[in-house]
Amino acid sequence: MAGGRRNGHWVLCWVCVLLMVERVSVASGLSTGAHTSPPFPASGVNQTPVVDVSIQAESWHLCRDVCGLNASDRCDFIRTNPDCRSEGGYLDYLEGIFCHFPPSLLPLAITLYAFWLLYLFLILGVTAEKFFCPNLSAISTTLKLSHNVAGVTFLAFGNGAPDIFSALVAFSDPHTAGLAFGALFGAGVLVTTVVAGGIAILRPFTAASRPFLRDIVFYMAAVFLTFTALYRGRVTLAWALGYLGLYVFYVVTVVLCTWIYRWQRRRSLVSSMPATPEMLSDSEEEDRVSSTTTSYDYREEYQPLLFYRETTAQILVQALNPLDCRKWRNKPAYWRVLKVLKLPVEFLLLLTVPLVDPDKEDRNWKRPLNCLQLVISPLVLVLTLQSGAYGVYEIGGLFPVWGVVVIAGTAWAAVTFFATTNSEPPRLHWIFAFLGFLTSALWINAAATEVVNILRSLGVVFRLSNTVLGLTLLAWGNSVGDVFSDFTLARQGYPRMAFSACFGGIIFNVLVGVGLGCLLQISRGHAEVKLEPEGLLVWVLAGALGLSLVCSLVAVPLQCFQLSQIYGFCLLLFYASFLAVALLTEFGVIHLKSV
């Protein structure tokens, strides 16, 4: 898995950019505002694209004060105040709390929302790990990409997909821009302190000096850009393009430095061992061999010795089964409970998301399922893009778009079914990897939209700012996968790889998350994106992240890049102190004296 997830491609990056531009550019255009009642209101048809941020902030604070009203007035206030409505998503969570639950059952509603929020994080993790990243691996293998280019582009995109999509969704609405900054900065502080410190505690090691210094300098530059943008209070087109340009420069630097290092290493080894050049081995060769051996499919051991041809129906049933009975019997109880929760998600994803595995002989070609996915996957695309606004649109007022998609997909599936066989994948099987990538990306985007809307609703109920929600719940939820994967790598004896991932991945999250999010806002017709920090907390967050990076930049070289357990505990103490200061600032214990 670690070797497969290192792959990706720039072409796909621009495909996703165009997809997200299309998704966000209509957020206040035709058919915006997908809500529960009515499902897809057209209130945004004539909306003015330029909005006064100060007025929005004031109105949103009024919405946050809904709990101070009489219980009988809360539902009408939520329904009539336009700033209390979500710009996207399938459910109106504020209306659910204040209109469908009596005041006495408010704790029950919050508890249900909390469980649904945890399940959404589970959906994000399963989709990214089992469908999004493997399809990226298949695409990069098909296109024969370099591991370096793939690692700093789509490996980072695959690992940070929940953070990136959450940031894009949050930046699409001026009300939740603080949520994006809180999540990106909060995840940065969490990963560079808790995750990095935990790795040093689990397995003390010697960090790679040049990659560490390179990544931390680039990350400090990204934080400085964001801090300056917050101080200026706006992000222009040039500033947004500067974010993306800095990331391109980072990619070029990584590739160039790696090439120079490998060239020097080979030259030194050749000069020392001129007679045995065939014994030279590259680290990437070892990684590729280890990833190939660890990706061995043990189910082949259970294949019958005699040849047996499965029927089309048996292939379909087996391909849609997300549960391995042999693995189920050998796993502990907690794994079984988690697997039961994952089963509905995995079944739905197996049904809707094509999956290509280049490590298998048949490349995971399942003829009946893949043909069925040619009908279902395009349907999922139009029903999840802009929360289904495109899918329900009627062409000429007569026939919906989703009906056209079903007819076209059925014709495509029929041609594919009769032109292929069960045993051999078609020549254009790689197209399914692109289709699976787009479908899984939109599933992640849909789940991220619901996460942002739930956190926004919880902020209204508890009267919390979007920034504190971002740096706590959203940052923790999106970083769960990084925590488990990096800790697992450290326990398996790869602490340097895990430590490098702590700084390399979040560079992508900040530069692309903020840059692309603001660029999408500007593409909607704004001359610039106005930023209004939510009080002192944003500055505390940015300052804490900058301070943690400066401390690491000074402390690690002073230790000769020897990271001990003491250093790890110091990082954990730093995060605990930061979290305490942030919460005290949010609740007004720490505040600036008014002049």
Image (cartoon, grey):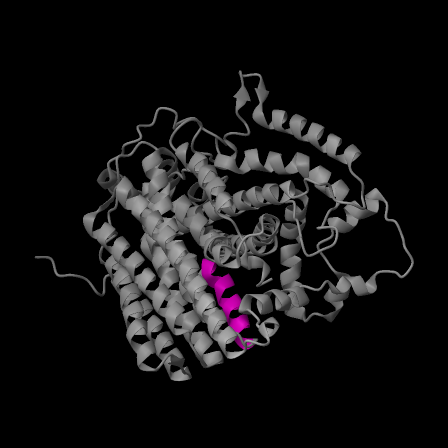
Percent coordinates x, y for residue 7 in the rendering? 54, 55
Q: Is residue 293 left or right of residue 215?
A: right
Q: Which of these two is toward me, 465 or 418?
A: 418
Q: Which quadrant would the C terminus be assigned to in this image?
A: bottom left
Query: Looking at the magenta stretch, what is its main secondary structure?
Result: helix
Up-down: is 100 above or below 289? above
From what the image shows, is residue 471 above or below residue 318? below
- Determine which quarter of the picture holds residue 502: bottom left
Q: Which residues are magenta?
A: 477-491
* Point 39% across, 35% down: residue: 79
Q: Position of residue 404 (x, y in %)?
A: 62, 24
The quadrant of the image that shows the N terminus is: bottom right
Q: Nearer the viewer, residue 40 or 348?
A: 348
Q: Quadrant of residue 474?
A: bottom left
Q: Position of residue 426 (x, y in %)?
A: 73, 41
Magenta highlight on residue 490: yes
